Structure formats: structure tokens, C-alpha cells
Image (cartoon, helix red, strand yellow):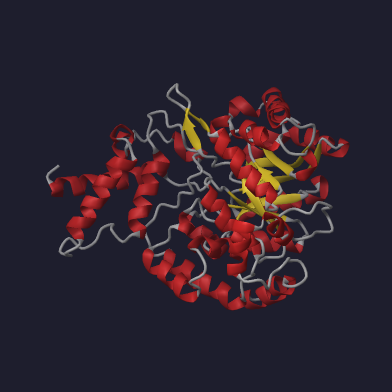
Amino acid sequence: MDRREFIEKGVLAAVGTTLLGACASDRQAKSNTQTDPAKMKQDMASHSFDSLEEKVSLLGYGCMRWPMIDDGKGGQIPDQEAVNDLIDKALVCGINLFDTSPMYNGGLSEKATAAALSRHPRSSYYLSTKLSNFGPENASREASMRMYENSFRQLQTDYIDFYFLHSIGSRIEDFQTRYIDNGMLDFLVEQRRIGKIRHLGFSFHGNKKNFDYFMSLHEKYHWDMVLIQMNYVDWKYATLNNKNATNAEYLYGTLSSMGIPVLIMEPLLGGRLAKIPEPLVHKLQERDPRRSVASWAFRFCASHPGVLSVLSGMTYMEHLEDNLSNFAPLEPLTVEDVDFLQDIAKIMMEYPVVPCNDCKYCIPCPYGIDIPGIFNHYNKCVNEGSIEPDSQDPAYRKARRRFLSGYDASVDPLRQADKCIHCGQCIEKCPQEIDIPHELSRIDHYAETLRRESGL
């Protein structure tokens, strides 16, 4: 079955049956966001599954990127007042799934999320978290049990709706150590049986061979859902950025054929699909001037009927409101829209961005380097067309100045790429398997070249 046939039989078959309010206009949706939360809650899109009794909102809240403030001690903590406001708005408008982890926001996400949610009835939302027992210090039975039990305390709950084995797939040996040898997977299956965990699954980053192996375990463990990285770029091009990745088209297609509900992470590729190169922004605006750049990415994911929820890390209220306008109600993509986005994705592959999703798993760096900040600034300049223009171009001097001044403004000079000693500790932590030291060296060389040319 080719892509067009797959979309026509899958995505378009869902229109009018599994999506709520799919025929309403985007302008009406934006009006609802601003004036009528009750109508928005009624119109919030959802997909239904025979294997799940819950009616989960198609837009889920990813709690990895809460707004942060200074803690007065040189560190950062979630801005609890802002978190409260965001969660209140999300609930009243129909979002009912909140996904977190013991490692998000420097280990503070579960607590901040629960502090906001505990002000509402437990029956009004679904909690999702993970066993993030990375590294030898966390993979033992004792350490894993402590993490599991602490999640219940932090989340202020006696049951968890969706529980994931966190980020398996890069190495089968790690899965064996983290979940099999220590007996944790058998323990979690038992916890599901007695109701402490309602649904059990895993989040995946890795190659096709490893994914197929985990699918072969379905008969034994019965995965209730799987969390995958999916967006219109990774649909066909994930393996171009990471040879050990798997294209989302294969991941989704396999899970859908097995009847396993899919949750989606990184629908915006860590924000990169909201900040695409300017020529591509113009193409999206020409096709539909009503839509934000980010909305195309979310609607791509939400238009697939095998998706249970699309998780979005909405840091600010404007992010939340824009997403609500696209999901309540949802206007699914047409076949032509999907083909158009694949053309956009193909062009994006020609831009020399670093494939960083800003997940911050690589930090803290032992040498204090702001790895995500460096990559974010570099990618921003690529998208603006100000990286490596012809030195004879009249705009070259302006572009050079913009890169250097922006670099020093967004990244502390003591935390820039030149401080990297290539220890390689960050590589093991990166879900995208980026050769981070190599990319830092490349960016440092580029910055130093610009400085020499500027006489700095």
C-alpha cells in the first residue's frame, strides 16, 4: 500500500466518525479559545479505542518544558503560579492527559504538575509518567523501586493511568539491565494487574531491529500503548539525521496494524517545526494564511486515527491557546496537505541544522556547556538564512554580526562551544544520538572564523 492509499484508507476514513467537530473553521475555533472554554471542551478532539475505556483528549500536555524561574540559590525551579494557570486553562478547555517523568525539569516536573492538578478532582484528568532509571546508579532493583514509589508521592496519587518504560530502543542490553535482570518489568505487570498502574507501555528511541524486538514481546507483556517520536519530518526522514533511528511511518504503521494506541512526542521536533526556514514559512502561509506554522505539525499527527494523544510541551499561554485552536475542534489534513508537508520536509533536509530537540537530556554538562542553547542559536540563524552566506554578498557583514552578537547574548561566553573537551558523556544521553562534541566543534570553528574576520 503506497502513502496516498494509506492516508486515504486510514486518515480520511476517520473523518466524521472519530473526530469531534472536524468541519468547523479555524476562525471559529480561535474564537472559542478566547471566549467559550465550555464549548472548546465539548469540541476537543479525541480518538476512541476498543482496548482503552478512557476518553483521552487528542491534545495532551507534555510536562517537560514548564516555565522556570530562579530559585534564589543560583538554580532554577518551575514557576508554580504559571504552571497552575496553564493547567487550569488546559483542563477547562478539555485537555485531560498530563505526561511527566522523574527526570523532567531537573527532577521537579512531577511535583510541580501534581501541585497544580491536585487542586482539581482526580477523576478529571489522566496522569502519565515513566520509570526513568537511566545509568548504573538508577538501574538496580532498589533504585528503580525507589523511583517508582517516589512518583506516587510526588504525583499525590494512589494510581497512575499511563506508565512507560522510559526511552528504550537504543541498546537491547540497557533494556535488559533496566527492566529484565532486576525484575522490574515483571513487577510493573503485576502492578498493572492490581490496578496501581492502569496501562503499561514504553517510549521508544532506536532502530527498526530493536523496535521489532519489542513488538515481539507484545504477546507476553501486552503493551497497552507506545510513545513514539512522530512528526512530518521524521515520518520519512528520521534515519537521515540518525542512522540508528526509525522512520515514524514504520513505527506508526506497525503499531496501528497491531491495534496498539500511539502517543506522540516531539510533534514539533523540540520546537524546530515552529521555527522553520523563512522561505518555507512563506509556503505554509500561502497555502493557508489562517494557520500558524506550528499548527501544520500538530494537525499532521492528529490526523492519523491510530493516535491516542499528541503531547505538546506548552511552556507559555500563547502556545496553549494556539494548540487549543487547532484541536478544539480539529480540521484534519487532506491527502493533498500531507503530500505538501512531505515536500516541505524534503526541502528542510537541505538545511544544515543540528537535529537537536531541546530535550535537555544532555545537561548538566560536567564542564557547564549550554549545549541546547548553542544548538538553538545556531539553528535559528540557519533558518533565518544567516549561516555561511557568500562573503561577497552585501548581507554577509550583517549576518556575521547577527550571529556573533546573538551568540553572546543567548549563551554565556563561559558556557560556549569552545569549552568542550570532547569527553563524550553527552553522546550517551542524547535520544537523537547526535555527535554532540563534533557539532560543538563545528559551531565553534564557525564562530571563531567570524570573529577573526570581524577583528574580535
Answer whether residue 175 is visible to the viewer in this image. Answer: yes
From this viewpoint, is residue 301 visible?
A: no
Q: Quadrant of the N terminus?
A: bottom right
Q: Position of residue 322 (x, y in %)?
A: 55, 57
Q: Is residue 200 above or below residue 369?
A: below
- Residue 180's place in the image compared with 296, above or below, is above
What number of labels is visible? 0
Counting from the top left corner in percent of width and height, residue 78 is at: 54, 33
| Residue lying at 87% horizontally and 35% vertically, measured from the top left | 194
- As drawn, which residue projects farthest toward the front? 35
Q: Residue 352 in the image: x percent, y percent?
A: 36, 58
Question: In the picture, residue 414 is in which quadrant?
Answer: top left
Q: Is 149 placed left or right of 102 in the picture? A: right
Q: Please give the name of the residue rendered at 39% of the width and 65% of the height, measured from the top-left corner.
A: 350
Q: Quadrant of the C terminus?
A: top left
- Relative to 232, 401 lies left or right: left
Give the answer, above or below, for where 27 lies relative to 205: below
**Percent coordinates x, y for residue 308 in the rendering:** 72, 56
